[in-house]
């Protein structure tokens, strides 16, 4: 705090100061050098003492007892700062009063009771009792301090023991958790090529069975055709009197989700669009994902909240038909049941998606860093991929190989060996290590090492990247094709999961659904430079034993295609049954019986 400025009186001119001997006035000399301020202060103190004594005598005469006197004396000591003495006198007064009352209650008479009370009061006022009070007080304080120290120590020990375990558990749950669950454990994003697949992945990731998921989707297909913006009757603006959204919320339920959408996402999301092609130009793909995620989450929230009876009934179903009927009757309550149509829809979704990998709670994709080519750089991927023990997977000393089937039968494809994780392998001569990534085979993510062909790019100027497992075989295929002058060019090789999602979203019928393309597993290549339409099912009449989609042209181009096919078979590659340009190490396509012997373990 700053010093206060001096306050000066009015200027009195040149009034002379007193002489030094004026300071020796009576009462201010050496007689009063003590702390009490001299004789005057001593006189005042003596007066106070006499007054206090007079008060005590008066109280004694009035009460005939030392009890009240002790109380008066204690109050005086407390005012003067002697807290222990004050407490002692007050305690003496209390003890004396209790004794007087107790003796009086026995009928012994007031004089005897008064004498007993005075005796107890006098006892409590002795120095011995004062020392006892001081000792007890010190003991109490010491006990309190010791208790605090003990509690603090125990608490610190508990915290030090528990927090690391909690921290480790949190780390493990973030790194290694693969459990789903409904409601609170529902996915945090929608993943898939189109809205149908996103809905399937989301509901499965939320813990619903394949049959239950299909039943819900069969109803959504009937209600909205998976258009999250559609309003009943193709209205241009939503109305709470009619349905809106994936399940066509109506009436009060419509009003509730309308308010929730506006509160969380904004007014731009509460619109009516008769079809997805009629969305406003400002509505992006991310915006569509946001409303789909919101509505799917809202459905699950209702099934676990206000519509819990419907949710419990759905959870009890075990067949596609029962799940479809349950969701319509308990949740939709549509009025126009069209139940047969809903069941057909549900069965179609079940046939399409059953058997796919159950999505993780966050979706099926992992956000690996990729460059413009869709390839994970080595300096990012090596640090990004680690197992649940925290040890980074490093490339080993072995390169991959197209392992023969145990039967050693010619032309047999060992799918079990080809689909093993390859992150621990090294890239062979003729290729450059491009790091590791999470690749997908039949919807299941696995760690693989990627190798890029040296000094060669595809027709778009991107590296030709492949799975390390088949890299040695592909290098031999490429080298031999060049030696034969077959003008081998590639238009597409390895694709990231995100790239496959984008392709599928733009052309659902022209690309495999995400997680199910051999391009994603680094084992497929598209051959370019054929002068004909690259349209699926554009196959020629040439028949091959493995029922490949043959080149539809003639002449030199057809002969070049035949040579590439034969060379591919030599090194373990097959032409797709619907695309003449697609060559892969794991045969795929709609025609499962392709006269190709496979080993699946």
Image (cartoon, rainbow, N blue to C red):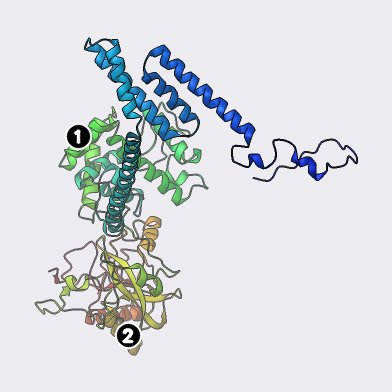
Ranked by sequence position, the earlier of labels 1 and 2 is 1
Please tell me how many numbered marks the rendered image carries.
2
Q: Residue at x 32, y 86 (%)?
A: 429
Q: Position of residue 284 (x, y in %)?
A: 48, 50
Label 2 Cα crowd, 10 Å radius (few <14 / some 14-19 / many 20+):
some
Q: Position of residue 11 (x, y in %)?
A: 87, 38
Residue at the spot 30% in from the left edge and 23% down from the top edge:
119
Task: Tell me the quarter of the image containing the C terminus.
Answer: bottom left
- The residue pinned by badge 2 equals 481
Foreground mark, 1 or 2, reads 1
Residue nearest the viewer, comparing 418 with 556 = 418
- SS for tag 1? helix
Horizontal side, residue 320 vs residue 299: left or right: left
Disc number for residue 313: 1
Q: Identify which residue is drawn at 40% across, 59% down.
A: 502
Q: Quadrant of residue 566?
A: bottom left
x, y percent for residue 285: 44, 51
Image position of 460 (left or right of 203): right
- In depth, the one of 157 and 540 nearer the eye is 157
């Amino acid at each position: 705090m700053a010093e206060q400025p001096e306050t000066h009186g009015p200027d009195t001119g040149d009034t002379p100061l007193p002489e030094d001997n004026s300071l020796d006035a009576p009462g201010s000399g050496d007689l009063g050098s003590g702390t009490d301020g001299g004789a005057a202060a001593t006189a005042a103190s003596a007066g106070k003492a006499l007054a206090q004594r007079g008060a005590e005598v008066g109280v004694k005469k009035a009460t005939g007892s030392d009890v009240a006197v002790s109380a008066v004396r204690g109050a005086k000591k407390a005012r003067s700062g002697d807290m222990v003495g004050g407490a002692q006198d007050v305690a003496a007064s209390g003890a004396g009063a209790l004794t007087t009352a107790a003796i009086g209650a026995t009928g012994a008479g007031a004089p005897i009771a008064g004498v007993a009370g005075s005796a107890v009061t006098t006892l409590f006022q002795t120095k011995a009792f004062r020392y006892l009070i001081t000792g007890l007080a010190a003991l109490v304080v010491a006990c309190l301090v010791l208790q605090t120290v003990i509690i603090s120590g125990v608490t610190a020990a508990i915290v030090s023991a528990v927090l690391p375990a909690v921290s480790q558990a949190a780390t493990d749950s973030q790194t290694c958790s693969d459990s789903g669950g409904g409601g609170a454990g529902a996915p945090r994003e929608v993943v898939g090529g189109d809205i149908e697949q996103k809905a399937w992945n989301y509901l499965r990731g939320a813990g619903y069975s394949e049959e239950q998921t299909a039943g819900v989707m069969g109803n959504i297909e009937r209600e909205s055709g998976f258009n999250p913006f559609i309003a009943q009757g193709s209205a241009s603006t939503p109305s709470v009197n009619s349905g809106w959204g994936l399940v066509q919320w109506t009436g009060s339920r419509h009003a509730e989700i309308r308010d929730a959408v506006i509160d969380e996402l904004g007014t731009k999301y509460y619109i009516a669009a008769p079809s997805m092609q009629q969305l406003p130009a400002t509505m992006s793909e991310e915006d569509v994902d946001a409303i789909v995620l919101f509505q799917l989450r809202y459905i699950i929230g209702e099934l676990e909240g206000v519509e819990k009876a419907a949710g419990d009934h759905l959870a009890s179903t075990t067949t596609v038909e029962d799940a479809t009927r349950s969701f319509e009757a308990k949740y939709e309550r549509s009025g126009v049941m069209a139940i047969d149509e809903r069941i057909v829809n549900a069965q179609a979704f079940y046939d399409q998606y059953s058997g796919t990998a159950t999505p993780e709670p966050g979706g099926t994709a992992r956000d690996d860093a990729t460059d413009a080519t869709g390839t994970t750089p080595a300096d990012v991927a090596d640090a990004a991929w680690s197992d649940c023990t925290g040890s980074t997977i490093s490339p080993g000393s072995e390169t991959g190989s197209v392992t023969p089937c145990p039967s050693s039968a010619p032309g047999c494809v060992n799918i079990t060996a080809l689909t093993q994780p390859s992150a621990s392998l090294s890239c062979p001569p003729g290729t450059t290590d491009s790091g590791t990534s999470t690749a997908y085979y039949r919807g299941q993510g696995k760690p693989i090492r990627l190798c890029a062909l040296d000094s060669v790019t595809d027709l778009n100027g991107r590296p030709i990247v492949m799975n390390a497992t088949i890299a040695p075989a592909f290098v031999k295929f490429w080298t031999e094709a060049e030696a034969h002058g077959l003008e081998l060019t590639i238009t597409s090789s390895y694709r990231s999961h995100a790239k496959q999602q984008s392709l599928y979203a733009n052309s659902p019928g022209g690309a495999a659904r995400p997680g199910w393309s051999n391009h994603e597993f680094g084992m497929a290549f598209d051959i370019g430079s054929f002068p004909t339409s690259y349209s699926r099912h554009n196959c020629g009449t040439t028949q091959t034993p493995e029922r490949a989609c043959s080149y539809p042209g003639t002449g030199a181009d057809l002969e070049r295609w035949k040579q590439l096919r034969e060379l591919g078979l030599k090194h373990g590659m097959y032409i797709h049954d619907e695309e003449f340009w697609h060559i892969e190490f794991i045969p795929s396509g709609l025609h499962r019986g392709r006269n190709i012997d496979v080993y699946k373990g």
